[in-house]
Structures are given as C-alpha cells and as structure tokens.
Amino acid sequence: MDRVVKTKLAFVVSLHVKHSKEGVRSTTNRLAMEHFDKLNCSPDDHVLYVGYGDEAVILATRVNSVVVIDVDPALLEIGKSDRPADNVEYLQDDLGEGSPHLANWGESFSQVVSIGRVMFYPNVPLVLRNMVGCLKPGGQLLCVIPNNDFNFFGGAAKVIEDHPEWGQRVKKSNLTLWNHTEEQAEEFFQGICDWSELSCKSQRVYHGLPEQKAKLILLDTLDQVGSSHQEECLKALWQWALNEYGCTEDGCLKKPSEYMVIYGVKRT
C-alpha cells in the first residue's frame, strides 16, 4: 500500500466513523437497496460494479461473481478488509481510455451497476458509454448518478480557494456532477445502443448528516490542501455547511441532493 493510500486510510480512521457502514455511503446504501429489485439476477450472472460500495457484496449473494472497480485505491483497501468475499474481486480502474481491463472484458457482464460514485471518475460520459459496452446483449444497467449537489462540493472548494494559505494549493476538482434532465439522460443513453427497456428518473434525497459523516463526504475535496491542514480545513468546511444549509434540532446538517436513476435492458 503506497504512502498516499495509507495517509488517507489513517485519516478516515481518525474521524471515528466506519466508512463502510455509517459514513458517506449511508445514503447510497439506501438508494441501492431501493433500486436493486429492478435487477433480475441469477446464480450464473457476472456483475461489474463501478465505484466501491458495500452493496456489491449483497449482489454477490445473488450472482456468480462481482468485479468491483474504483479510482480510489483507499476505498478498494477498505472493501478488501471490511467486505471480503470469495466471489468479489476489487480492481483499480477508471473505465476510461487507459483502462487496463476494458479490452479484455468486452460484452461479458450480465449486469453493470453503479451507485453514486461515477462523479469521481475523470470522464463521466466515456465511463457511462464503457459501462454499457461491458453489457452482454440482454444485460441490465442500473446506474444512480449524483445529478445535483446544491453547491455542496463547489461551495466547499470555494471556501478552500478563498483561504489565504489553502487557496495557493487548490487543484482542479476531481468530481463531475451530471446535471441532466430526464429527457437529456434518455437521449444520451439512446445514443449509445438500442434498448428493449430504458428508464431515466430523477430522485430528490434529503440528508440528515451528523458532523463526522459530513466530514467524510468532504474528505475528497481535501486532497488539494495537504494532510497537515486537513483537520483545520474540515472544521472550516463544517461551519460553512451549517451556515449554507442549516441544521436539525439534533445538530445534523440538512442537505438536499438529486440523483438520476437509470435502468435499462440492452436489446439482444
């Protein structure tokens, strides 16, 4: 494990919130459980899971095998330690032009699933096209894409930019929100291949985020400030978020998010 991955894992542990069960993935876990029933899985199926999530292991109980990919090696290490399974493989891959695995996969997966992590991939349109390309004819796509974060990540990045010291270290953001209407989403996927079934629906979710959970979500913005400033920066971002969105009576952040839920069956 390299130094950057070790540093990130150590920092997650220092927040005293277990990422896999109670952290950033809690909302996407609920979204996954809500929409997994759309998938008709069988014991012979092979699934590609794009973006680490605990839910992949749930799918693994229903199918032959699951390949989980992510761009973040720290999350893959969490998956290997927290959610090991004989029929789950964890691989680093951005599903882009330099993908080390894409050429070998071809149209080999019965289902391709992604819940909430696509926004961290360098080229979202290309990733989505390649996800569809990995599907067998008759295969199923389930993709829940963060569509609108109501300025959560952009606002946090602005806080860092405006700081007299941190702002000197700001790099380009590593996330891309999709910002598509339902009609635009359907047009995009219709342009990739023919579908026997296709549905693109937006879904609004309201988060009640305790401080430590919010900090885990904001952790991905902190690569730009360096590990020595992470704690100080997180305190500033938490205060900004409270001012921006308000909080509940028990001190949780009240934050809306919108997701685009895509389900399709590739025509045979």
Image (cartoon, grey):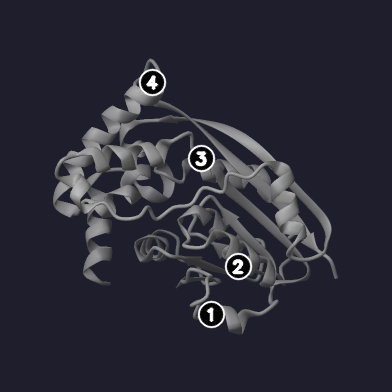
Where does label 1 land, which residue? 101
Where does label 4 land, which residue? 246
**In the image, 96: left or right of 238?**
right
The alpha-carbon separation of the residues under discs 3 and 2 comes to 21 Å
Element at badge 1? loop
Q: Residues within 10 Å of mark 2 (few under 14, many from 20)?
A: many
Q: Amino acid at mark 3?
A: Thr
Q: Earlier in the sequence, mark 4 or mark 3?
A: 3
Element at badge 3? helix
Q: Residue at x 38, y 21 (%)?
A: 247
What quarter of the picture does the C terminus occupy? bottom right
Q: Residue at x 23, y 56 (%)?
A: 10
Element at badge 4? loop
The alpha-carbon separation of the residues under discs 3 and 1 comes to 29 Å
Which is more toward the observer, 224 or 43? Answer: 224
Name which quarter of the figure residue 196 lies in.
bottom right
Which is more toward the observer, 145 or 19? Answer: 145
Q: Earlier in the sequence, mark 2 or mark 4?
A: 2
Residue 257 sits above or below residue 92 on the image: above
Q: Earlier in the sequence, mark 3 or mark 2?
A: 3
The alpha-carbon separation of the residues under discs 4 and 3 comes to 19 Å
Q: Amino acid at mark 1?
A: His
Q: Position of residue 176 (x, y in %)?
A: 48, 52
Q: Nearer the viewer, mark 2 or mark 1?
A: 1
Q: Nearer the viewer, mark 2 or mark 4?
A: 4
Q: Nearer the viewer, mark 3 or mark 1?
A: 1
Q: Amino acid at mark 2?
A: Leu
